[in-house]
């Protein structure tokens, strides 16, 4: 763990989902390739799909699909992907080691907990309910608000939780996670176990870098 700048009292911990709370890459790979195969398009390796995630479903699909498709063909693929992911999107997904215990301890200390993800909102609600139903006070995905790094989503989460944004920590594994925290005025905490290279965190003004979920307890 490395603290790079000071923080005030943290009353709420808001989490990115994929690569932060959940190791969801295997399901993202499977559903993406099932979608591509369903429509007769070439599939991708897990390593290739890893480079496509982090900015929401539409970004993932636009990168995965052949580049000469019509808007209608793209929308059909997105619709099919969502339906399939809602059905099977948690078959291989796992909570990162130590996360459930850390969330329970934060909750026991009276901290508010929430999810803010660039994953489409329907998927965020399904996965939050499945894995964290008794822990998260609120969850929000892409759709109701603009995607990260636009600060509107994080500001809405803070308002819903009833916590001033300066007392919110946002935890994520990507450049857009550090950016949204800084844009909103929250405290950015980068988790190094996620999907993006370390320099995507260090180059975007993190307040702290953590090596394991339990490190969050030092901020509570």
Image (cartoon, rainbow, N blue to C red):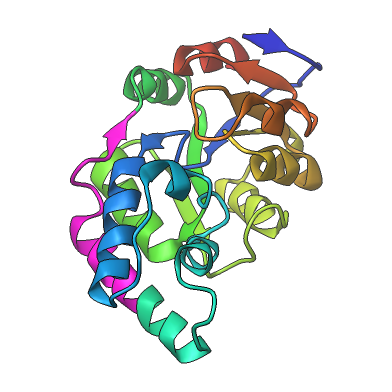
Residue 33 or residue 130, whichever sits in front: 33
Q: Number of callouts in the render?
A: 0
**Quadrant assignment, res 18:** top left
How far across and how far down the image is residue 126, in percent?
A: 30, 56
**Residue 179 seen in this snapshot:** yes
Q: Residue at x 72, y 12 (%)?
A: 3
Q: Classify residue 12 by image quadrant.
A: top right
- Horizontal side of 155 relative to 41 (left or right) equals right
Q: What's the residue at 76%, 35% (across, down)?
A: 166
Please state, as top left, top right, bottom left or bottom right, where the N terminus lies in the image: top right
Q: Is residue 75 above or below residue 101?
A: below
Residue 25: quadrant of the picture: top left
> Which residue occupies the foreground of this view, 186 or 98?
98
Q: Nearer the viewer, residue 148 or 43?
A: 43
Residue 121 highlighted magenta (yes or no) = no
The image position of residue 9, as x and y in percent, is 70, 21
Q: Is residue 53 left or right of residue 198?
A: left
Side of 145 where 84 appears, left or right = left
Report x, y in % for residue 61.
Answer: 46, 66
Q: Is residue 164 visible?
A: no
Q: Which residues are magenta?
A: 79-95
Q: Residue at x 76, y 47 (%)?
A: 184
Which image quarter is the C terminus in? top right
Using the image, determine if residue 162 lies above or below residue 203: below
54 left or right of 153? left
Residue at (51% x, 28% y) in the render: 111
Queried whether the magenta region covers residue 81, the answer comes back as yes
List x then y, in percent, for residue 173: 57, 33
In the rendered image of this protein, does residue 28 appear above or below residue 99? Answer: below
Q: Nearer the viewer, residue 164 or 83?
A: 83
């Amino acid at each position: 763990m490395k603290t790079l700048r000071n923080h005030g009292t943290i009353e709420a911990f808001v989490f990115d989902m994929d690569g932060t709370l959940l190791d969801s890459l295997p399901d993202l790979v499977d559903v993406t390739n099932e979608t591509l195969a369903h429509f007769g398009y070439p599939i991708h390796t897990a390593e290739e799909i890893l480079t496509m995630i982090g900015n929401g479903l539409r970004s993932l699909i636009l990168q995965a699909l052949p580049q000469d498709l019509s808007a209608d063909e793209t929308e059909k693929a997105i619709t099919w992907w969502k339906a399939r992911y809602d059905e099977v999107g948690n078959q291989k997904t796992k909570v990162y080691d130590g996360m459930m215990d850390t969330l329970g301890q934060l909750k026991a200390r009276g901290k508010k907990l929430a999810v803010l993800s660039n994953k489409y909102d329907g998927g965020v609600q399904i996965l939050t309910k499945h894995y964290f139903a008794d822990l998260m006070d609120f969850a929000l995905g892409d759709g109701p608000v603009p995607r990260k790094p636009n600060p509107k989503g994080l500001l809405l989460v803070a308002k819903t939780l009833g916590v001033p944004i300066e007392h919110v920590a946002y935890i994520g594994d990507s450049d857009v996670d550090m950016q949204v925290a800084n844009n909103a005025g929250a405290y950015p905490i980068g988790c190094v176990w996620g999907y993006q290279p370390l320099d995507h965190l260090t180059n975007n003004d993190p307040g702290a870098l953590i090596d394991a979920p339990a490190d969050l307890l030092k901020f509570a």
